[in-house]
Amino acid sequence: MSAKIITLSRHIIEEERKFPKATGKFTDLMNDIAFAAKLISYNTNKAGLMGILGETENVNVQGEVVKNLDVFAQETMVKALDHGGHTCVMASEEEEDIISIPDEYPLGKYAVLFDPLDGSSNIDANVSVGTIFSIYNRVSPEGRPGTKDDVLQPGIRQVCAGYVIYGSSTMLVYTTGNGVHGFTLDPSYGEFILSHPNIRIPKKGKIYSVNESNFDYWKQEVKNYIHYVKQIDEATDRPLNSRYIGSMVADVHRNLLYGGIFLYPASKTAPNGKLRLGYEANPMSFIVEQAGGRATNGTQRILEIQPKTIHQRVPLFLGSEEDVRLLEEFISGKRS
Ligand code: AHM
Ligand code: MG
């Protein structure tokens, strides 16, 4: 007899049942996100064929205009989330301002932030990309359109965060603050199946992930840390291995499973780092913390930062607890 198969929908329903006042809206919202993820996955997988299937000038064989994949992912997420009556407002990396729910659709209690296709510069090289999402309860009055206040909440208030990685297989990983669970898309059924229950990040890892070409632009403390992890010392299991894909979802996903630290520090050219607090740093930090890891901007826990703008950037260091703590010692000057 084979083991019990748990689909994503079943898992979410069972999670939601733990809350006596649950209405099922959250389950519906997550199902909408999972549906968008399947569409993006399908289109990501055939992205390489786009150029040889007979399109000319961005028009494909059906006479449709071929959309750039990040535009497709953005539209797919918005369309999947705007009509179900679960959402009151959205924010996305691809849209300057908040995204309102069209007048013809009912308003819901959730605010959703997302990066529809993170790491999209990697698409043409067949390298993994991902979708990141973050869900909050609205704070603006119910029954009216959501506002900026709904999407500018500190990460600690997230009710759910997740990512989808379009890699050698497609996986959806999410947390509602009750551990981190990973589901692999079975292409034959089109279902996400629980494959990685209760993911725990190792306390200490063997990997550091950073774009080291920025080395000369970093602050001295970060340079010292990177110099340290590369030194040979058997007692502390150094040097660490360097692994950098350049797709945060893929880099963090790997570190979550194998252990390690991911860094996107501030630099002379990017004084607040590159990554965005609302739809990149916060959801990934919630997941990493829920898996037993740690996430900081160097001096403050990411999840406690009060966002001021939708596209605010933040230096980001996250991963295995001991590795991140060690980095913090370098940043605070306890080590050099
Ligand atoms: P994007 O949202 O424009 O794709 O940028 C985010 C990506 C992350 O996935 C990745 O960690 C980072 O940019 C890589 O940046 P860099 O090329 O500077 O190393
Ligand atoms: Mg991004």
Image (cartoon, rainbow, N blue to C red):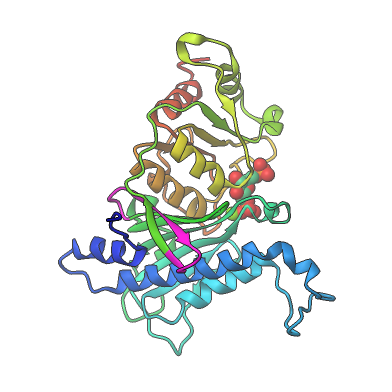
Image region (quadrant) for ligand 2: bottom right
In the foreground, 180 or 176: 180
In the foreground, 204 or 280: 204
Residue 161 at x, y percent in the picture: 40, 56
Residue 110 at x, y percent in the picture: 36, 69
Q: Is residue 333 above or below residue 142?
A: above
Q: Is residue 304 above or below residue 132?
A: above
Name the residue located 70 percent from the left edge and 68 percent from the top edge. Answer: 68
User: Which residues lie in the magenta part?
Assistant: 176-191
User: Within the image, what quadrant is residue 106 found in?
Assistant: bottom left
Name the residue located 54 percent from the left edge and 64 percent from the top edge. Answer: 92
Residue 59 appears in view = yes
Residue 118 at x, y percent in the picture: 59, 55
Q: Is residue 284 above or below residue 294?
A: below
Give left or right: position of 20 versus 74.
left
Give left or right: position of 218 versus 20.
right
